[in-house]
Image (tube, rainbow, N blue to C red):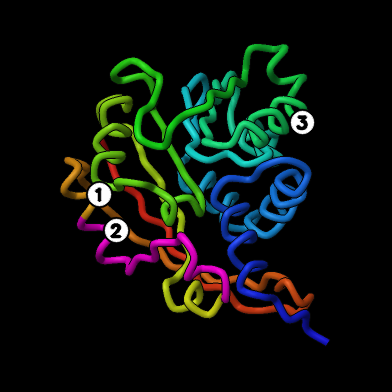
Amino acid sequence: MEHQYTEADLIKIAQQLACPQGDHGIKTGEVMNISNAGMTQAAINLLQLKGAESVLEIGHGNGGHIAYLLNQANELKYHGVDISPTMITEAERINLDFIGRNSVSFSLTDGLNLPFSNQSFEKVFSVNTLYFWKNPQQYLKEIFRVMKPKGTLIIAFADKMFMESLPFTKYGFTLYEKQTVMDIVKNAAFNQIEYFQKSEQIKSSAGNLVNRTYHLLSAKA
């Protein structure tokens, strides 16, 4: 029988998805790593990584996918930023060996500013974080600032209709149609914007398999 959540439960779930905290946040990070695996790998594959490139991920969660990314090419440098201290700590724990090899680093951010110099990264990506960006237009301009000319940006986000079917997304999520995202990206000076749609089966909170449609937006700096 499916668990009946109270409004307070749903608000807590939404808050943890936006910014995982404490022991519950660690569990949320584990669940997100599993449920987002397909989207994350699709985004990484679309980056078409090449040797010695610098990669920035916005909202890395527990970083359980970083080994997959580093396997795509030689001498990659990965930098992750997140608004959750809990996720920073977990990602550092999980990727301790890579940190020791100077292949991986993490930074805590405020979701508005990026602590990097202009033109620092060839590739930037983010999976299922767009819903929580405080000011998407401003943030995309900040992302553009830290990208090298002709660098690639990939944004992955779930279809609005699917997200609206989830009971917790009414609390603190901003959901987007694909055209809205494309317009925001274009207005931030990106070009060569491409759009891809995929679908997958994921396990719901009730343990059932459900179909999720998601979008991948690719753009050049």
Circle 1 residue: 185
Residue 11 in the image: above or below residue 103: below
Image side of residue 87 versus residue 212, left or right = right
- Amino acid identity at mark 2: Val
Label 2 crowd (10 A; few <14 / some 14-19 / many >=20): some
Cβ atoms at labels 1 and 2 below 8 Å apart: yes
Q: Quadrant of residue 221?
A: top left
Q: Residue furthest front?
A: 8
Q: Is residue 179 magenta?
A: yes
Q: Quadrant of residue 64?
A: top right
Residue shown at 66% from the left, 73% from the top: 201
First in residue order: circle 1 vs circle 3? 3
Residue shown at 44% from the left, 70% from the top: 159
Q: Secondary structure at mark 3?
A: helix
Circle 3 residue: 94
Image side of residue 177 versus residue 47, left or right = left
Q: Is residue 35 magenta?
A: no
Q: Quadrant of residue 12?
A: bottom right
Q: Marks 2 and 3, Cα distance to the nearest angstrom?
A: 32 Å
